Image: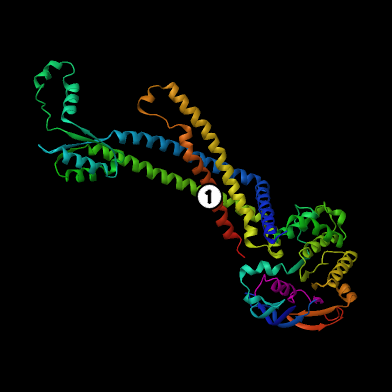
Amino acid sequence: MTSDRLGIRMRISTIGYCLKQGLKNIWRNKMFSLASIATMSACIFLFGIFFAVVQNFQSIVREAEEAVTMIVYFEKGTSQEIMDAVGEEIKTRDGVASVQFVTPEQAWDSFKGVYFAERPELAEGFADDNPLVDYAHYEVYLNDVSLQADLVTYIESLEGVRRVRASQEVADILSNFNLLVGYISIAVILLLLCVSVFLISNTVTIGIAVRKEEIAIMRLIGATNSFIKAPFVVEGILIGLIGAALPLGLLYYLYNSLTGYLEEQFNLLTGFMKFLPVNELFEILLPTGMLLGVGIGFFGSFFTIRKHLRV
Amino acid sequence: MIDLDNVTKAYAKGTHALNGISLHIDKGEFVFITGSSGSGKSTLIKLLLKELEPTSGTIKVNGITLGRMKNRAIPKYRRMLGVVFQDFRLLKDRNVYDNIAFAQRVVITPTKQIRKNVPAMLSLVGLAEKYKSFPRQLSGGEQQRVALARALVNSPKILLADEPTGNLDPKNSKEIMRLLEIINERGTTVVVVTHNQEIVDEMKKRVIVLDKGVIVHDERQAGYTYAD
Protein backbone atom coordinates (compact mmCIF):
# COMPACT_ATOMS: atom_id res chain seq x y z
CA MET A 1 0.00 0.00 0.00
CA THR A 2 1.42 3.42 -0.93
CA SER A 3 1.97 5.98 1.81
CA ASP A 4 -0.65 8.24 0.18
CA ARG A 5 -3.32 5.55 0.34
CA LEU A 6 -2.32 4.71 3.88
CA GLY A 7 -2.61 8.41 4.74
CA ILE A 8 -6.11 8.62 3.27
CA ARG A 9 -7.24 5.48 5.11
CA MET A 10 -5.83 6.84 8.35
CA ARG A 11 -7.64 10.11 7.82
CA ILE A 12 -10.90 8.32 7.11
CA SER A 13 -10.59 6.27 10.28
CA THR A 14 -9.76 9.44 12.24
CA ILE A 15 -12.80 11.24 10.82
CA GLY A 16 -14.88 8.18 11.70
CA TYR A 17 -13.45 8.21 15.22
CA CYS A 18 -14.18 11.93 15.70
CA LEU A 19 -17.74 11.50 14.41
CA LYS A 20 -18.31 8.57 16.72
CA GLN A 21 -16.90 10.45 19.69
CA GLY A 22 -18.99 13.52 18.82
CA LEU A 23 -22.14 11.36 18.82
CA LYS A 24 -21.03 9.71 22.06
CA ASN A 25 -20.56 13.14 23.65
CA ILE A 26 -24.12 14.04 22.73
CA TRP A 27 -25.39 10.73 24.08
CA ARG A 28 -23.39 11.01 27.33
CA ASN A 29 -24.74 14.50 28.04
CA LYS A 30 -28.23 13.62 26.85
CA MET A 31 -30.06 16.23 28.88
CA PHE A 32 -27.76 19.11 28.01
CA SER A 33 -27.60 18.07 24.39
CA LEU A 34 -31.38 17.89 24.25
CA ALA A 35 -31.65 21.31 25.88
CA SER A 36 -29.19 22.72 23.32
CA ILE A 37 -30.98 21.10 20.40
CA ALA A 38 -34.35 22.34 21.73
CA THR A 39 -33.14 25.90 22.16
CA MET A 40 -31.34 25.87 18.85
CA SER A 41 -34.55 24.54 17.27
CA ALA A 42 -36.57 27.29 18.92
CA CYS A 43 -34.10 29.91 17.67
CA ILE A 44 -34.07 28.59 14.11
CA PHE A 45 -37.88 28.21 14.24
CA LEU A 46 -38.26 31.84 15.30
CA PHE A 47 -35.73 32.85 12.69
CA GLY A 48 -37.73 30.90 10.09
CA ILE A 49 -41.02 32.53 11.09
CA PHE A 50 -39.39 35.94 11.06
CA PHE A 51 -37.75 35.24 7.73
CA ALA A 52 -41.06 34.09 6.22
CA VAL A 53 -42.87 37.20 7.49
CA VAL A 54 -40.09 39.52 6.28
CA GLN A 55 -39.92 37.85 2.89
CA ASN A 56 -43.68 38.11 2.44
CA PHE A 57 -43.66 41.75 3.55
CA GLN A 58 -40.82 42.54 1.21
CA SER A 59 -42.68 40.86 -1.60
CA ILE A 60 -45.67 43.11 -0.88
CA VAL A 61 -43.41 46.15 -0.67
CA ARG A 62 -41.76 45.17 -3.95
CA GLU A 63 -45.14 44.97 -5.61
CA ALA A 64 -46.06 48.35 -4.13
CA GLU A 65 -42.75 49.79 -5.31
CA GLU A 66 -43.39 48.55 -8.80
CA ALA A 67 -46.66 50.49 -8.77
CA VAL A 68 -44.88 53.75 -7.96
CA THR A 69 -44.66 55.80 -11.13
CA MET A 70 -42.98 59.07 -12.06
CA ILE A 71 -44.31 61.13 -14.98
CA VAL A 72 -41.82 63.12 -17.05
CA TYR A 73 -43.29 66.08 -19.00
CA PHE A 74 -41.50 68.03 -21.74
CA GLU A 75 -41.22 71.69 -22.73
CA LYS A 76 -43.52 72.85 -25.55
CA GLY A 77 -42.10 72.03 -28.96
CA THR A 78 -39.49 69.50 -27.73
CA SER A 79 -38.44 67.35 -30.69
CA GLN A 80 -39.03 63.59 -30.78
CA GLU A 81 -35.21 63.06 -30.99
CA ILE A 82 -34.66 64.85 -27.69
CA MET A 83 -37.51 62.95 -26.05
CA ASP A 84 -36.06 59.66 -27.29
CA ALA A 85 -32.65 60.62 -25.92
CA VAL A 86 -34.17 61.46 -22.52
CA GLY A 87 -35.96 58.09 -22.53
CA GLU A 88 -32.68 56.29 -23.21
CA GLU A 89 -30.92 58.25 -20.45
CA ILE A 90 -33.61 57.37 -17.91
CA LYS A 91 -33.47 53.67 -18.79
CA THR A 92 -29.80 53.50 -17.87
CA ARG A 93 -30.31 54.84 -14.32
CA ASP A 94 -30.24 52.67 -11.18
CA GLY A 95 -33.64 52.01 -9.61
CA VAL A 96 -35.53 52.26 -12.89
CA ALA A 97 -37.56 49.13 -13.65
CA SER A 98 -39.08 50.23 -16.96
CA VAL A 99 -39.88 53.33 -19.02
CA GLN A 100 -42.95 53.77 -21.18
CA PHE A 101 -43.45 56.55 -23.71
CA VAL A 102 -46.98 57.95 -23.93
CA THR A 103 -47.80 59.91 -27.13
CA PRO A 104 -50.18 62.93 -27.03
CA GLU A 105 -52.81 60.75 -28.74
CA GLN A 106 -52.52 58.01 -26.14
CA ALA A 107 -52.63 60.64 -23.36
CA TRP A 108 -55.83 62.14 -24.87
CA ASP A 109 -57.43 58.68 -25.26
CA SER A 110 -56.65 57.89 -21.67
CA PHE A 111 -58.03 61.26 -20.52
CA LYS A 112 -61.21 60.69 -22.51
CA GLY A 113 -61.53 57.24 -20.99
CA VAL A 114 -61.42 58.71 -17.50
CA TYR A 115 -63.35 61.99 -17.82
CA PHE A 116 -65.72 61.55 -20.79
CA ALA A 117 -66.54 57.88 -20.43
CA GLU A 118 -70.22 58.56 -19.72
CA ARG A 119 -70.63 61.44 -22.20
CA PRO A 120 -68.31 60.77 -25.12
CA GLU A 121 -70.09 63.36 -27.29
CA LEU A 122 -68.52 66.14 -25.22
CA ALA A 123 -65.10 65.11 -26.41
CA GLU A 124 -66.06 65.14 -30.06
CA GLY A 125 -65.56 68.92 -30.21
CA PHE A 126 -61.84 68.23 -29.92
CA ALA A 127 -61.89 65.66 -32.69
CA ASP A 128 -59.30 67.37 -34.88
CA ASP A 129 -57.57 69.39 -32.22
CA ASN A 130 -55.90 67.32 -29.50
CA PRO A 131 -55.75 69.58 -26.40
CA LEU A 132 -52.92 67.45 -25.01
CA VAL A 133 -50.68 67.88 -28.06
CA ASP A 134 -47.82 69.07 -25.83
CA TYR A 135 -48.38 66.37 -23.25
CA ALA A 136 -46.26 63.55 -24.63
CA HIS A 137 -44.56 62.08 -21.55
CA TYR A 138 -42.73 59.14 -20.04
CA GLU A 139 -44.11 56.89 -17.31
CA VAL A 140 -41.15 55.72 -15.30
CA TYR A 141 -41.60 52.61 -13.12
CA LEU A 142 -39.19 52.09 -10.22
CA ASN A 143 -37.78 49.05 -8.46
CA ASP A 144 -36.12 51.01 -5.67
CA VAL A 145 -38.16 53.92 -4.40
CA SER A 146 -35.34 55.11 -2.14
CA LEU A 147 -33.58 56.42 -5.29
CA GLN A 148 -36.61 58.42 -6.43
CA ALA A 149 -35.53 61.85 -5.11
CA ASP A 150 -32.10 61.66 -6.82
CA LEU A 151 -33.72 60.42 -10.00
CA VAL A 152 -36.18 63.35 -10.08
CA THR A 153 -33.33 65.86 -9.68
CA TYR A 154 -31.37 64.14 -12.42
CA ILE A 155 -34.25 63.93 -14.92
CA GLU A 156 -35.23 67.56 -14.30
CA SER A 157 -31.73 68.57 -15.31
CA LEU A 158 -32.05 66.88 -18.72
CA GLU A 159 -32.61 68.93 -21.88
CA GLY A 160 -36.27 69.47 -22.79
CA VAL A 161 -37.73 68.26 -19.49
CA ARG A 162 -40.31 70.66 -18.06
CA ARG A 163 -41.44 68.87 -14.94
CA VAL A 164 -41.30 65.51 -13.19
CA ARG A 165 -44.36 64.50 -11.22
CA ALA A 166 -43.70 62.09 -8.37
CA SER A 167 -45.14 61.45 -4.95
CA GLN A 168 -42.21 61.68 -2.55
CA GLU A 169 -44.49 60.75 0.34
CA VAL A 170 -45.22 57.24 -0.94
CA ALA A 171 -41.55 56.78 -1.77
CA ASP A 172 -40.51 57.85 1.73
CA ILE A 173 -43.01 55.59 3.48
CA LEU A 174 -41.96 52.57 1.45
CA SER A 175 -38.22 53.10 1.80
CA ASN A 176 -38.55 53.82 5.55
CA PHE A 177 -40.60 50.68 6.00
CA ASN A 178 -38.00 48.67 4.12
CA LEU A 179 -35.26 50.11 6.33
CA LEU A 180 -37.23 49.34 9.50
CA VAL A 181 -37.79 45.74 8.44
CA GLY A 182 -34.07 45.44 7.72
CA TYR A 183 -33.06 46.80 11.14
CA ILE A 184 -35.53 44.58 13.02
CA SER A 185 -34.27 41.55 11.07
CA ILE A 186 -30.66 42.26 12.02
CA ALA A 187 -31.53 42.86 15.70
CA VAL A 188 -33.61 39.68 16.07
CA ILE A 189 -31.07 37.53 14.23
CA LEU A 190 -28.20 38.87 16.35
CA LEU A 191 -30.13 38.19 19.55
CA LEU A 192 -30.94 34.64 18.50
CA LEU A 193 -27.34 34.06 17.48
CA CYS A 194 -26.06 35.15 20.88
CA VAL A 195 -28.52 32.91 22.77
CA SER A 196 -27.64 29.89 20.64
CA VAL A 197 -23.89 30.40 20.85
CA PHE A 198 -24.17 30.70 24.64
CA LEU A 199 -26.12 27.45 24.89
CA ILE A 200 -23.81 25.46 22.64
CA SER A 201 -20.86 26.83 24.56
CA ASN A 202 -22.47 25.67 27.83
CA THR A 203 -23.06 22.16 26.52
CA VAL A 204 -19.51 21.85 25.23
CA THR A 205 -18.10 23.18 28.53
CA ILE A 206 -19.98 20.46 30.40
CA GLY A 207 -18.79 17.89 27.85
CA ILE A 208 -15.20 18.97 28.48
CA ALA A 209 -15.69 18.74 32.26
CA VAL A 210 -17.16 15.24 31.93
CA ARG A 211 -14.26 14.11 29.73
CA LYS A 212 -11.55 15.88 31.73
CA GLU A 213 -9.80 12.64 32.66
CA GLU A 214 -9.95 11.30 29.13
CA ILE A 215 -8.52 14.55 27.76
CA ALA A 216 -5.67 14.41 30.30
CA ILE A 217 -4.85 10.84 29.22
CA MET A 218 -5.04 11.82 25.55
CA ARG A 219 -2.51 14.57 26.15
CA LEU A 220 -0.10 12.25 27.95
CA ILE A 221 -0.35 9.69 25.17
CA GLY A 222 0.54 12.34 22.60
CA ALA A 223 -2.75 13.40 21.05
CA THR A 224 -2.51 16.59 19.04
CA ASN A 225 -4.68 19.53 20.03
CA SER A 226 -6.78 19.20 16.90
CA PHE A 227 -7.41 15.52 17.63
CA ILE A 228 -8.60 16.40 21.16
CA LYS A 229 -10.76 19.27 19.92
CA ALA A 230 -12.33 17.60 16.88
CA PRO A 231 -15.00 15.51 18.71
CA PHE A 232 -16.24 18.63 20.53
CA VAL A 233 -16.47 20.57 17.27
CA VAL A 234 -18.30 17.61 15.72
CA GLU A 235 -20.65 17.63 18.74
CA GLY A 236 -21.38 21.34 18.23
CA ILE A 237 -21.92 20.93 14.49
CA LEU A 238 -24.23 17.93 15.01
CA ILE A 239 -26.30 19.82 17.58
CA GLY A 240 -26.49 22.71 15.12
CA LEU A 241 -27.43 20.41 12.27
CA ILE A 242 -30.18 18.60 14.18
CA GLY A 243 -31.31 21.84 15.82
CA ALA A 244 -31.72 23.42 12.37
CA ALA A 245 -33.16 20.46 10.43
CA LEU A 246 -36.06 19.81 12.86
CA PRO A 247 -37.58 23.32 12.90
CA LEU A 248 -37.01 23.80 9.16
CA GLY A 249 -38.94 20.61 8.43
CA LEU A 250 -41.72 21.72 10.75
CA LEU A 251 -41.77 25.20 9.22
CA TYR A 252 -42.04 23.77 5.72
CA TYR A 253 -45.09 21.79 6.71
CA LEU A 254 -46.70 24.59 8.76
CA TYR A 255 -46.10 27.34 6.17
CA ASN A 256 -47.53 25.25 3.40
CA SER A 257 -50.63 24.32 5.41
CA LEU A 258 -51.21 27.77 6.91
CA THR A 259 -50.85 29.79 3.69
CA GLY A 260 -53.02 27.28 1.86
CA TYR A 261 -55.65 27.52 4.58
CA LEU A 262 -55.57 31.34 4.69
CA GLU A 263 -55.82 31.69 0.92
CA GLU A 264 -58.70 29.26 0.85
CA GLN A 265 -60.64 30.66 3.79
CA PHE A 266 -60.07 34.37 3.26
CA ASN A 267 -60.45 35.02 -0.45
CA LEU A 268 -60.39 38.75 0.22
CA LEU A 269 -56.73 38.49 1.20
CA THR A 270 -55.68 37.45 -2.25
CA GLY A 271 -56.88 40.83 -3.55
CA PHE A 272 -54.11 42.79 -1.88
CA MET A 273 -51.53 40.23 -0.80
CA LYS A 274 -50.19 37.00 -2.13
CA PHE A 275 -48.11 34.57 -0.05
CA LEU A 276 -44.77 33.50 -1.45
CA PRO A 277 -44.84 29.84 -2.55
CA VAL A 278 -43.20 27.56 0.04
CA ASN A 279 -40.55 26.32 -2.38
CA GLU A 280 -39.53 29.85 -3.32
CA LEU A 281 -39.26 30.76 0.37
CA PHE A 282 -37.22 27.64 1.20
CA GLU A 283 -34.79 28.25 -1.67
CA ILE A 284 -33.19 30.79 0.65
CA LEU A 285 -34.50 29.74 4.07
CA LEU A 286 -33.24 26.14 3.89
CA PRO A 287 -29.55 26.86 3.14
CA THR A 288 -29.57 29.94 5.39
CA GLY A 289 -31.14 28.06 8.31
CA MET A 290 -28.83 25.05 7.93
CA LEU A 291 -25.79 27.27 7.57
CA LEU A 292 -26.86 29.24 10.61
CA GLY A 293 -27.30 26.07 12.68
CA VAL A 294 -24.00 24.55 11.60
CA GLY A 295 -22.23 27.91 11.93
CA ILE A 296 -23.52 28.52 15.46
CA GLY A 297 -22.61 24.94 16.40
CA PHE A 298 -19.14 25.26 14.94
CA PHE A 299 -18.22 28.66 16.38
CA GLY A 300 -19.94 28.01 19.71
CA SER A 301 -17.93 24.84 20.27
CA PHE A 302 -14.70 26.02 18.63
CA PHE A 303 -14.28 29.10 20.82
CA THR A 304 -15.33 27.26 23.98
CA ILE A 305 -12.69 24.60 23.33
CA ARG A 306 -10.05 27.24 22.68
CA LYS A 307 -10.89 28.73 26.05
CA HIS A 308 -10.98 25.49 28.04
CA LEU A 309 -8.41 23.30 26.32
CA ARG A 310 -5.26 25.36 26.31
CA VAL A 311 -2.09 23.24 26.51
CA MET B 1 18.78 8.81 26.47
CA ILE B 2 17.86 11.17 29.37
CA ASP B 3 20.15 14.03 30.47
CA LEU B 4 19.42 16.52 33.20
CA ASP B 5 21.90 19.33 33.69
CA ASN B 6 21.64 21.41 36.87
CA VAL B 7 17.82 21.32 36.82
CA THR B 8 15.90 23.33 39.41
CA LYS B 9 12.16 23.50 39.77
CA ALA B 10 10.78 26.06 42.21
CA TYR B 11 7.08 26.51 42.84
CA ALA B 12 5.30 29.80 43.40
CA LYS B 13 5.47 29.56 47.21
CA GLY B 14 9.26 29.48 46.93
CA THR B 15 9.64 25.77 47.71
CA HIS B 16 12.23 23.97 45.60
CA ALA B 17 10.91 20.60 44.39
CA LEU B 18 14.21 19.97 42.60
CA ASN B 19 17.37 21.81 43.42
CA GLY B 20 20.06 21.78 40.76
CA ILE B 21 20.05 18.07 39.94
CA SER B 22 22.12 16.54 37.15
CA LEU B 23 21.81 12.96 35.98
CA HIS B 24 22.29 10.78 32.94
CA ILE B 25 20.27 7.67 32.05
CA ASP B 26 21.53 5.49 29.19
CA LYS B 27 19.44 3.95 26.46
CA GLY B 28 18.02 0.60 27.63
CA GLU B 29 18.65 1.25 31.33
CA PHE B 30 16.28 0.28 34.15
CA VAL B 31 16.30 2.94 36.87
CA PHE B 32 14.45 3.28 40.16
CA ILE B 33 13.93 6.76 41.55
CA THR B 34 13.14 6.65 45.22
CA GLY B 35 12.86 9.05 48.11
CA SER B 36 10.43 10.16 50.76
CA SER B 37 7.26 12.15 50.00
CA GLY B 38 8.07 15.66 48.76
CA SER B 39 11.56 14.67 47.65
CA GLY B 40 10.81 15.73 44.04
CA LYS B 41 10.21 12.33 42.38
CA SER B 42 6.86 13.20 40.79
CA THR B 43 8.13 16.63 39.74
CA LEU B 44 10.93 14.88 37.88
CA ILE B 45 8.41 12.71 35.99
CA LYS B 46 6.29 15.78 35.16
CA LEU B 47 9.37 17.59 33.84
CA LEU B 48 10.22 14.62 31.63
CA LEU B 49 6.63 14.55 30.33
CA LYS B 50 6.91 18.29 29.70
CA GLU B 51 3.88 18.90 31.87
CA LEU B 52 6.06 21.33 33.83
CA GLU B 53 8.91 23.64 32.81
CA PRO B 54 12.10 23.75 34.90
CA THR B 55 12.92 27.05 36.60
CA SER B 56 16.50 26.64 35.40
CA GLY B 57 18.74 23.99 33.86
CA THR B 58 18.51 21.84 30.75
CA ILE B 59 16.65 18.59 30.09
CA LYS B 60 17.51 16.51 27.04
CA VAL B 61 15.56 13.40 26.06
CA ASN B 62 16.70 11.30 23.11
CA GLY B 63 18.74 14.27 21.89
CA ILE B 64 15.84 16.73 22.10
CA THR B 65 16.27 19.78 24.33
CA LEU B 66 12.84 20.14 25.99
CA GLY B 67 13.24 23.86 26.76
CA ARG B 68 13.51 24.71 23.07
CA MET B 69 10.55 22.59 22.07
CA LYS B 70 7.54 24.44 20.60
CA ASN B 71 4.08 23.69 22.00
CA ARG B 72 2.92 22.08 18.79
CA ALA B 73 5.83 19.60 18.94
CA ILE B 74 4.87 18.33 22.42
CA PRO B 75 2.37 15.65 21.25
CA LYS B 76 4.97 14.13 18.92
CA TYR B 77 7.54 14.13 21.72
CA ARG B 78 5.14 12.44 24.15
CA ARG B 79 4.58 9.61 21.68
CA MET B 80 8.17 8.63 22.44
CA LEU B 81 7.19 8.07 26.08
CA GLY B 82 4.90 5.54 27.72
CA VAL B 83 3.40 6.48 31.09
CA VAL B 84 1.94 4.39 33.92
CA PHE B 85 0.39 5.86 37.06
CA GLN B 86 -0.42 4.58 40.54
CA ASP B 87 -4.17 5.12 39.95
CA PHE B 88 -4.07 3.36 36.51
CA ARG B 89 -6.05 6.17 34.80
CA LEU B 90 -8.10 3.86 32.63
CA LEU B 91 -11.26 5.07 30.89
CA LYS B 92 -14.02 3.54 32.96
CA ASP B 93 -16.64 3.59 30.22
CA ARG B 94 -14.52 1.54 27.80
CA ASN B 95 -13.50 -2.07 27.91
CA VAL B 96 -9.94 -3.36 28.02
CA TYR B 97 -9.61 -3.57 24.23
CA ASP B 98 -10.91 -0.03 23.70
CA ASN B 99 -8.68 1.39 26.43
CA ILE B 100 -5.61 0.11 24.63
CA ALA B 101 -6.94 0.85 21.14
CA PHE B 102 -7.63 4.40 22.34
CA ALA B 103 -3.88 5.02 22.70
CA GLN B 104 -3.39 3.93 19.09
CA ARG B 105 -6.30 5.98 17.77
CA VAL B 106 -4.90 9.06 19.44
CA VAL B 107 -1.71 8.72 17.40
CA ILE B 108 -3.78 8.00 14.27
CA THR B 109 -2.89 4.34 13.72
CA PRO B 110 -4.93 2.59 10.98
CA THR B 111 -7.71 0.38 12.35
CA LYS B 112 -6.25 -2.70 10.66
CA GLN B 113 -2.99 -2.16 12.55
CA ILE B 114 -4.83 -1.56 15.83
CA ARG B 115 -6.59 -4.91 15.42
CA LYS B 116 -3.17 -6.60 15.27
CA ASN B 117 -1.36 -4.59 17.96
CA VAL B 118 -3.93 -4.65 20.76
CA PRO B 119 -4.23 -8.47 21.07
CA ALA B 120 -0.43 -8.73 20.94
CA MET B 121 -0.10 -6.29 23.84
CA LEU B 122 -2.84 -8.08 25.79
CA SER B 123 -0.97 -11.37 25.37
CA LEU B 124 2.24 -9.75 26.61
CA VAL B 125 0.55 -8.58 29.83
CA GLY B 126 -1.39 -11.84 30.19
CA LEU B 127 -4.90 -10.46 29.69
CA ALA B 128 -5.74 -11.85 26.25
CA GLU B 129 -8.99 -13.35 27.47
CA LYS B 130 -10.21 -10.30 29.33
CA TYR B 131 -10.35 -7.93 26.37
CA LYS B 132 -14.08 -7.40 26.77
CA SER B 133 -13.97 -6.65 30.50
CA PHE B 134 -14.47 -3.17 31.87
CA PRO B 135 -12.00 -1.71 34.40
CA ARG B 136 -14.51 -2.13 37.28
CA GLN B 137 -14.55 -5.89 36.56
CA LEU B 138 -10.76 -6.19 36.97
CA SER B 139 -8.50 -6.43 40.03
CA GLY B 140 -5.97 -3.67 40.74
CA GLY B 141 -3.14 -5.78 39.32
CA GLU B 142 -5.11 -6.46 36.15
CA GLN B 143 -5.97 -2.79 35.75
CA GLN B 144 -2.30 -1.88 36.07
CA ARG B 145 -1.45 -4.46 33.42
CA VAL B 146 -3.99 -2.86 31.09
CA ALA B 147 -2.40 0.53 31.82
CA LEU B 148 0.98 -1.00 31.01
CA ALA B 149 -0.32 -2.44 27.74
CA ARG B 150 -1.73 0.98 26.84
CA ALA B 151 1.62 2.63 27.64
CA LEU B 152 3.50 0.14 25.47
CA VAL B 153 1.21 -0.25 22.48
CA ASN B 154 2.73 2.73 20.68
CA SER B 155 6.25 1.26 21.12
CA PRO B 156 7.69 4.07 23.26
CA LYS B 157 11.45 4.51 23.63
CA ILE B 158 11.08 5.32 27.32
CA LEU B 159 8.60 4.01 29.88
CA LEU B 160 7.91 6.28 32.86
CA ALA B 161 6.13 4.58 35.76
CA ASP B 162 4.99 6.75 38.68
CA GLU B 163 4.39 4.49 41.70
CA PRO B 164 3.09 1.64 39.51
CA THR B 165 2.72 -0.72 42.48
CA GLY B 166 1.37 1.86 44.93
CA ASN B 167 -2.14 0.38 44.94
CA LEU B 168 -1.16 -3.28 44.55
CA ASP B 169 -0.53 -6.20 46.90
CA PRO B 170 2.97 -7.80 46.94
CA LYS B 171 2.03 -10.58 44.51
CA ASN B 172 0.62 -8.21 41.90
CA SER B 173 3.49 -5.77 42.49
CA LYS B 174 5.99 -8.48 41.64
CA GLU B 175 4.08 -9.40 38.49
CA ILE B 176 4.07 -5.80 37.32
CA MET B 177 7.81 -5.54 37.99
CA ARG B 178 8.44 -8.74 36.08
CA LEU B 179 6.58 -7.24 33.13
CA LEU B 180 8.61 -4.04 33.37
CA GLU B 181 11.76 -6.13 33.30
CA ILE B 182 10.59 -7.97 30.16
CA ILE B 183 9.81 -4.65 28.53
CA ASN B 184 13.26 -3.37 29.49
CA GLU B 185 14.91 -6.49 28.06
CA ARG B 186 13.19 -5.69 24.75
CA GLY B 187 15.14 -2.42 24.63
CA THR B 188 12.84 0.13 26.25
CA THR B 189 14.43 2.46 28.82
CA VAL B 190 12.42 2.12 32.04
CA VAL B 191 12.24 4.76 34.79
CA VAL B 192 10.24 3.72 37.86
CA VAL B 193 9.38 6.08 40.70
CA THR B 194 8.57 4.00 43.75
CA HIS B 195 8.35 3.72 47.53
CA ASN B 196 8.33 -0.06 47.42
CA GLN B 197 11.44 -1.08 49.35
CA GLU B 198 11.00 -4.82 48.88
CA ILE B 199 10.89 -4.55 45.09
CA VAL B 200 13.83 -2.17 44.83
CA ASP B 201 15.92 -4.45 47.02
CA GLU B 202 14.95 -7.55 45.09
CA MET B 203 15.50 -6.28 41.57
CA LYS B 204 19.05 -4.99 42.01
CA LYS B 205 18.82 -2.20 39.45
CA ARG B 206 20.24 1.29 39.40
CA VAL B 207 18.72 3.35 42.21
CA ILE B 208 18.67 7.16 42.35
CA VAL B 209 17.66 8.52 45.74
CA LEU B 210 16.20 12.01 46.00
CA ASP B 211 15.95 13.98 49.21
CA LYS B 212 14.53 17.53 49.36
CA GLY B 213 15.09 17.98 45.66
CA VAL B 214 18.69 16.82 45.64
CA ILE B 215 20.22 13.48 44.49
CA VAL B 216 21.74 11.97 47.61
CA HIS B 217 22.68 8.60 46.12
CA ASP B 218 23.00 7.15 42.63
CA GLU B 219 24.18 3.55 42.60
CA ARG B 220 24.03 0.67 40.17
CA GLN B 221 22.60 -2.68 41.32
CA ALA B 222 21.64 -1.12 44.61
CA GLY B 223 18.85 -1.57 47.13
CA TYR B 224 16.51 0.77 49.01
CA THR B 225 18.96 1.31 51.89
CA TYR B 226 19.51 5.01 51.29
CA ALA B 227 15.95 6.09 50.69
CA ASP B 228 14.88 7.02 54.20
Name which residue lies at 9% across and 25% down.
A129
Give how far across and how far down residue A51 sits, in percent: 45, 39
Which residue is painted at 67% across and 66% down in the image? B75
Using residue A118 as the reference point, say whether residue B110 is left or right of it.
right
Indicate whether B62 appears above or below A114.
below
Pointer 1 chain: A
Q: Which residue occupies 21% across, 37% down?
A: A166
The location of residue A290, given as percent across then percent down, is 53, 44
Q: For residue A189, what is the image quadrant? A: top left
Q: Which residue is mark 1?
A: A295
The kind of secondary structure element at disc 1 is helix
Residue B158: x %, y % from top left = 77, 72
Place residue B41 in its image quadrant.
Answer: bottom right
Label 1: few (<14), some (14–19) or many (≥20) C-alpha neighbours in 10 Å? some
Q: Residue furthest front?
A: A81
**In the rendered image, which quarter is residue B65 located in?**
bottom right
The amino acid type of the residue labelled 1 equals Gly
What's the magenta region?
Answer: B28-53
Q: Magenta includes A290?
A: no
